[in-house]
Image (cartoon, rainbow, N blue to C red):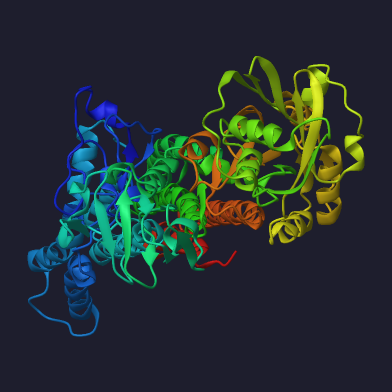
Amino acid sequence: MKSLNKCEVINKDPNHKHTYDAQGKMTCCTLEEKIYSNAGAKDLLKDGHTHDDGHDHGHNDEAGHDHSGTENSSTIKMFLPAIISLALLLIAIAFDNWIPQAWFTGWVRIVWYVAAYLPVGLPVLKEAVESIGKGEIFSEFLLMSIATIGAFAIGEYPEGVAVMLFYAVGEVFQTLAVKKAKSNIKALLDQRPDEVTVLENDQPKTVKAESVSIGDIIQLKSGEKLGLDGELISETASFNTAALTGESKPDTKAKGETVLAGMINLNTVAQVNVTTAYTDSKLSKILELVQNATTQKAPTELFIRKFAKIYTPIVVLLAVLICVVPMLIVEHYIFSQWLYRALIFLVISCPCALVISIPLGYFGGIGAASKNGILFKGSNFLDIIANIQNVVMDKTGTLTEGVFKVQEVNIKSEYNKDEVLTMVNALESKSTHPVATAIQQHLGNINTGIKLNAVEEIAGHGLKAEVNGKELLVGNFKLMDKLSIKYDIDPSTIVYTLIAIAYDKKFAGYLTIADSIKEDAQEAVNKLHSMNVKTTMLSGDKSSVVKFVADKLGIDNAFGDLLPEDKVNKVKAIKDRNETVAFVGDGVNDAPVIALSNVGIAMGGLGSDATIETADVVIQDDRPSKIAMAINIGKQTKKIVWQNIILAFAVKAIVLILGAGGLATMWEAVFADVGVALLAILNAVRIQRMRF
């Protein structure tokens, strides 16, 4: 279809700002974004944002070909030019064949057919001229213009009108199909209310959500959506988090917990202290992520776009040859007959089905994933994840809850237990690790009178500090080994996670900490195995704990007592076997492994902005079963894309051959172009209705 260059090719001004009309339509640069993002998400487009060279299928509204549609365009209005054209065409055919009219001859007949042609043909002719003016000569508009004007030139008036009419109708249906495909993104956007109720001097006041400042108090009634991220200051409140996680299961929050824009209050009136600006909310970041995902093209998509730019001019040349070459070799050459065949060939040649349906297929996959609380950073990752052979998972926070509880405290008798634990609690307050949180929750309030000096966190080992001039160590037993602290227990005999304590160069005791396995972890591993995906667990936790969890879940391979660099080496070893790897972790601590893997998957995107920045795929609700779902969405998306490619090529090849041989009419040509494009688009939209 219409060839497209980057925004920068059309507007080279580095200070250029994109502009939009009241309906959200971009009024500058190209229209490429519209096939993906005109669903009200215009505020997410970034200035100077570039795109891969490709094709624009969001034609101007004046032409009646805006595939992205507008909120205010009624279906009747979209079909009106086609309805007028069809009425005039049917009357003309009736006058020609069924109700002959003496006056319906000569120039009157020609003018009538021209009048039937103009409502659907004039916008396309205009687009053809504009495309040539931009240097995009071989566009679909030129092909359709030549084919239909050529039909008029050889006296085939009904077919000339019919080809353009069906083309216009097909474009309208494509518009409706694309609008349907965008419904998930629109639904996300709809979660941000335009107005919120804030308390000013304890009096409720309705204001624009974007005008609310950090520190303001929002009052949220039952059934209302939260407009900004904040901290719950009511004692408790239950929320529907479907907009963010894909899960409608109520999530009960307690006072002091974070609540996010898009959550719906389910029961009593709640009050929220705003902690983030409207434009920086978690939902805004998710919308931007999904928006930008369409710029990361899959290899298949890039190939088809490049192919179409080469394919179209070749077909135009072949059409010319079909018309001219027979003059030299056919004994009874009839120009109008061979011109008709060439015109059919041109109509068939439009690569609409490929260059619209394939990007739409990937967009549908991204939309279906986001609906289920899975965020893909690009359609290329849909392709990669579909072929994943190994899923390597972290343990804590991925397969286990990451919520530790202290089970046992064992301090040697020669130490003052309370004194040692008070120092440990003070040191652990310097860490945000889940283990540190568990220790603090168990030991209670921190003694602020303890002076900690030279506090250091040793990656993969634990914490080190100086207290009262003596060294205090809190961490795993690798920390004891690293600093040559002797101990008199065998850590491998204890299944629970162990936290060793050393003071003044001597082993002082240990704490045991337990974590629980997530309720859907078993389901996740079973689904991965059913897809013939091998599973591996890598953890810095002690080997006995790792083995216990792996055996319980049936994970193929498990390794414990690993440092971050050890995890990198394990993933390298898998890649050295020429196998693809997806690594699932928290997206921050495991950044080196995520960077090395083919696909980095982060759990719990709601908890950390850094997670969204680091990973290629973000699972928003921490559920490991979504790993298999993400792979399945990738597989289904790829299947639909290839179905469309095969359908388009097969039908076009057959009808092209028939057309060149004079065995196909304009009606077959219309089906090969508009019909196949419509079928392919409807197939692409199908992924939106799939249950994963």
How many marks do you count on the picture?
0
The residue lying toward the viewer, choosing from 268 and 261, is 268
- Name the spot of residue 483 as percent of width and height, x first: 79, 17
Question: Which quarter of the picture shows residue 469?
Answer: top right
| Foreground pick, 422 / 1 | 422
Q: Is residue 496 left or right of residue 153?
A: right
Front residue of 664 and 29: 29
Residue 184 pos. (x, y %): 41, 60
243 left or right of 374 in image: left
Is 667 positioned to the left or the right of 496 in the image?
left
Residue 52 occupies quadrant: top left
Instruction: Judge whether 88 appears above or below 654 on screen.
Output: below
Q: Residue 527: x percent and y percent?
A: 73, 59
Q: Is residue 336 visible?
A: yes
Q: Is residue 216 left or right of residue 244?
A: left
Give me the residue at 82% from left, 44% from top. 545
Residue 234, position in %: x, y?
37, 61
The quadrant of the image that shows the C terminus is bottom right
Residue 498 seen anywhere in this rendered image of the structure: no
| Residue at image point 92% right, 29% down | 488
As drawn, which residue projects farthest toward the bottom?
99
